[in-house]
Amino acid sequence: MKKIIISAVARNGVIGKSNGEMPWHSKEEFQHFKSTTFGSPIIMGRVTFDTLGNPLKGRLNIIISNNKNLNYNFENVKIFNSLNDAFVFCEKNNYEKVFIIGGAKIYQQAMQFADEMIISIMNFEADGDVLFPKIDDDIWEVASREKRNEFEIFVYVRRKRNDNKN
Ligand SMILES: NC(=O)c1ccc[n+]([C@@H]2O[C@H](COP(=O)([O-])OP(=O)(O)OC[C@H]3O[C@@H](n4cnc5c(N)ncnc54)[C@H](OP(=O)(O)O)[C@@H]3O)[C@@H](O)[C@H]2O)c1
């Protein structure tokens, strides 16, 4: 099962605001996110789910929280107390791929397990205090780049062990 991180990141690294407000709205980027993730489970932190307010349609929404009593009255939502439990569930249910959709705390932990990262770098800087974690280029390399109007999509894959950057 492929574990894929997907994120939209402003040129200055911002992905959000800790008060839950979205720093930008890009219909074009949301469409890319929707078409990429549609049909696959999406894994997110509890804070990100609360920011969304509702589950995203057409995808199993998996929420990670420490709260063992957390309960949302939505279909299409599952809650796990760890990222690993979520991955085990998805493996057992034979999903080909899962998307890790944020936020920063979840990205930070998922980066060590992810096979791929699909990062939309927006064409602007944004106001906000939640940042995408640093991408270590000893570990990750850019496999492809694709320009859109409001952003550029960078697909990162893990470097092969014997790659020599020099
Ligand atoms: N631009 C983008 O692509 C993008 C995507 C997603 C989110 N965002 C933004 O990111 C921000 C939210 O990010 P965030 O870092 O504050 O929060 P987050 O990663 O969405 O959620 C953090 C919460 O997840 C739970 N959690 C995290 N690690 C856990 C673990 N190992 N075990 C159990 N539970 C765990 C905890 O929930 P409990 O507190 O319930 O225990 C924790 O408080 C928002 O501003 C949002 O808009 C941006």
Image (cartoon, grey):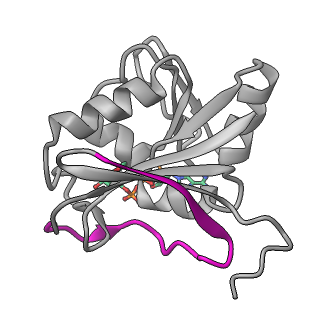
* Residue at the (35%, 69%) spot, across then down: 131
Give the image quarter of residue 11: bottom left
Q: Where is residue 36 shown, x and y percent of the image?
A: 45, 29
136 or 21: nearer the eye? 136
Q: Where is residue 49 shown, x and y percent of the image?
A: 37, 38
Query: Residue lying farthest right?
Result: 162
Tell me if residue 82 comes above or below residue 112 in the rendering.
Answer: above
* Residue at the (26%, 44%) spot, across then down: 148
| Viewport quadrant of the N terminus | top right
Q: Where is residue 161 shown, x and y percent of the image?
A: 84, 70
For the record, the magenta segment spans: 126-147
The answer to whether 18 appears left or right of 141 in the picture is left
Query: Residue lying farthest front?
Result: 166
Tell me if residue 61 comes above or below residue 119 in the rendering.
Answer: above
The answer to whether 5 appears left or right of 25 in the picture is right
In this rendering, the count of numbered labels is 0
95 or 139: nearer the eye? 139
| Viewport quadrant of the C terminus | bottom right
Give the image quarter of residue 14: bottom left
| The stretch drawn in magenta includes residue 131 | yes
* Residue at the (71%, 25%) spot, across then down: 96
| The stretch drawn in magenta includes residue 90 | no
The answer to whether 32 appears left or right of 157 in the picture is left
* Residue at the (65%, 46%) spot, across then down: 83
Tell me if residue 2 comes above or below residue 153 in the rendering.
Answer: above
Query: Residue lying farthest bottom?
Result: 166
Give the image quarter of residue 34: top left
